[in-house]
Amino acid sequence: MQKEKNMAKVTNLFYITILFLSLFFIAMNDAARYECREDSHCVTKVKCGLPRTPKCRNYICFCHNPNKYI
């Protein structure tokens, strides 16, 4: 009985660790901001999935979706 409780605790600790690390990496990826002066600076810095294209706005690169307002 004691062995099963310890196994459950280890499993829960494992899941919590995975959750924490995934949230940490998501936050790190979101915090990555690239400075730019024009759209051509963003082409090599930001990888966007189609149909989005890299754009420079307020000196920060981001992915622009041209179909967003259709």
Image (spheres, helix red, strand yellow):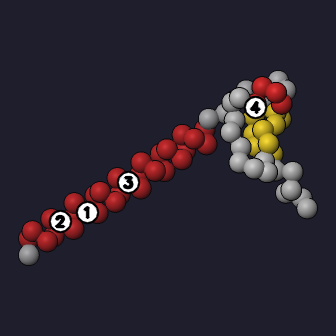
Residue under circle 3?
A: 18
Disc number lying in front (3 or 4): 4
Asked if the residues shown at circle 3 and circle 1 are in contact, with their CB atoms under 8 angstroms apart, the answer is no
Q: Which mark is residue 7?
A: 2
Task: Indicate the quadrant where residue 18 lies.
Answer: bottom left
Residue 70 to residue 40: above or below: below
Question: Which residue reaches farthest right?
Answer: 70
- Disc 4: CA contacts within 10 A as few (<14), some (14-19) or many (>=20): some
Point out residue 7 in the picture as x, y percentages from the top left corner.
17, 65
The residue shown at (29%, 57%) is 14
Point out residue 42 in the picture as x, y percentages from the top left corner.
76, 30
Task: Locate residue 13 relative to residue 56 in the image: left or right.
Answer: left
User: Marks 3 and 2, how far apart in space?
Assistant: 17 Å
Residue 58 at least partly seen: no
Residue 51 to residue 53: above or below: below
Mark 3 and mark 1 lie on one chain; the one further toward the N terminus is 1
Asked if the residues shown at circle 2 and circle 1 are in contact, with their CB atoms under 8 angstroms apart, the answer is yes
Badge 3 element: helix
Residue under circle 4?
A: 43
User: Marks 1 and 4, how far apart in space?
Assistant: 43 Å
Point out residue 43 in the picture as x, y percentages from the top left corner.
75, 31
Disc number lying in front (1 or 4): 4
